[in-house]
Amino acid sequence: MRRIRPEEVARARMDPRLLDAAEYRNEIIRGAYRMSGDDWLRRGNCAEAEPDVMYPEPREPIDAALAMCAACPVRTPCLVRALEARDRHGVWGNTAPRERRAMIEVWKDINPLAVGA
């Protein structure tokens, strides 16, 4: 696996999807949302998708998965789950694996309640 470049981390730091995920995590910490189990996962646009759509082989197109995620009602909790689990494979929360690798580097340094304060 190639190394994450500093410019990728800088871009991830400003990515609105990551910022939304951090705010969502804050709401979980404050008790506004629950993220127990995978009950939210059943509400995802991908709930009935074939696994190979969301987990394509390396270098295979992911456009279908990203299109499915774009309007998904649970894309933010999905991204939180992927970041918390440090999941580097598949499409989660409307992010490609390469995008998420940089986001994971930023995520581990985000002070949960400092975002949006």
Image (tube, rainbow, N blue to C red):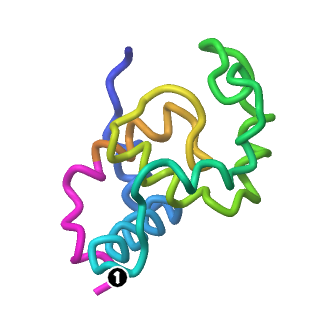
Q: Up-down: is 33 above or below 63?
A: below
Residue 104 picture location, percent across and down: 33, 43
Q: Residue at x 38, y 46 (%)?
A: 83
At 76% from the left and 25% from the top, the residue drawn is 50
Q: Is residue 50 above or below residue 34?
A: above
The answer to whether 36 appears left or right of 39 in the picture is left
Q: What residue does disc 1 label?
A: 116
Question: Residue 94 lies in magenta, yes or no?
Answer: no
Please state the horizontal and vertical placement of residue 23, each as a whole percent of the image.
Answer: 39, 73
Q: Tell me the residue at 59%/49% (across/down).
A: 41
Q: Position of residue 10 (x, y in %)?
A: 36, 52
Q: How many labels were placed on the picture?
A: 1
The magenta region covers 106-117
Q: Quadrant of the N terminus?
A: top left
The 10 Å Cα crowd at callout 1, few under 14, some 14 to 19, many 20 or more, is: few
Q: Secondary structure at mark 1?
A: loop
Asked which quadrant contains residue 112, the reply is bottom left
Q: Is 107 covered by the magenta stretch?
A: yes
